[in-house]
Amino acid sequence: MAAAFVEVERWRARFRARVAQSEDALLLAYGRLTAALPYLEAPMLAGDAEAARDRIELALGALGDASNNLSSAMSYMKAAEDLALTGGATVPSVPLHRIEQLPVKYVAEENAGLKLREARMDAKVAYPIVELSRSHLEAVLLLLDHPGVPGVDDLIEHERGAAVAGINTARANAELGCDWAIRARNDLPGAN
């Protein structure tokens, strides 16, 4: 009986740790998305390509970090779900199919798992938008190499604007994910 209690507490502790890691990764992603925006606020012109490239490289670095953080967050959230489905099952070798099937004695984990599901959906929405924003910035880098193309500054501004809009959208989704992850963590005793 004591061994079973130890196993239950072990998966619950690991679950709490994954929830905390999820929250941390989402907060980092939100911070990196926020950090990218100031580099892209001012217009960029082909005539000032060097300054524009420097700003884009800084933004791309922040977006790469955000992308990694979102990916990590999604992995941690999936790991938390898998831990709950396996650990909360009557027979761990036959995991539950859905977080809602957790026994009543694991109501905190069920509530946290449901909130993590929402956070993961927000991260899944944000991730490809971050990647698309990076692509827009890569397009700006290519356009900066062709100052003689008619209307190149308009094209650059269009791509920069699309990147900024994408980052703002991804940032909003990351913020929603952060809110869900914070609420999930707050549902768990000992996770704060």
Image (cartoon, rainbow, N blue to C red):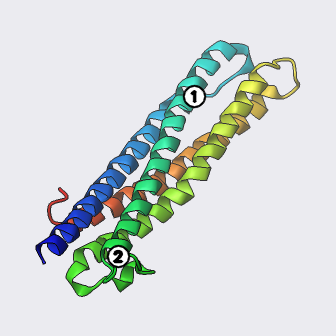
Q: With 148 as the anchor, is 161 left or right in this view?
A: left
Which residue does the image show at 22% across and 63% down from the upper left?
Answer: 10
The reply to whether callout 1 and callout 2 are in contact (CB within 8 Å) is no
Q: Left or right of 71: which side holds 85? A: left
Disc on the earlier residue, 1 or 2: 1
* Residue shown at 21% from the left, 71% from the top: 8
Query: Which class describes the residues within 10 Å of circle 1: few (<14), some (14-19), or many (20+)?
Result: few
- According to the picture, the residue beneath numbered tag 2 turns out to be 92
Q: Position of residue 174 (x, y in %)?
A: 45, 53
Q: Is residue 81 above or below residue 62?
A: below
> Which mark, residue 55?
none
Image vertical order of residue 96 relative to residue 30, above or below: below
What distance separates the C-alpha of mark 1 from that of mark 2? 55 Å
Between 103 and 6, the residue placed more toward the observer is 6
Using the rendered image of the protein, determine whether residue 37 is visible from the camera's viewpoint. no
Look at mark 1 in the image and give the residue it sits on: 42
- Residue 181 visible to an observer of this rendering: yes
Q: Which residue type carries mark 2?
A: Pro
- Per the image, label 2 sits on a secondary structure element best described as loop
Taking the spot 15% from the left edge, 66% from the top edge, the residue there is 189
The residue that appears at 70% across and 32% down in the rendered structure is 138
Kind of residue sitting beneath label 1: Ala
Quadrant where the C terminus sits is bottom left
Q: Position of residue 77 (x, y in %)?
A: 41, 60
Question: Which is in the foreground here, disc 1 or disc 2?
Answer: 2
Is residue 29 shown left or right of residue 111?
right
Disc 1, SS: loop
> In the current view of this chain or complex, which residue is farthest to the left?
2
Label 2 crowd (10 A; few <14 / some 14-19 / many >=20): few
In the rendered image of this protein, does residue 5 appear above or below residue 103? above
Q: Is residue 185 above or below residue 161?
A: below
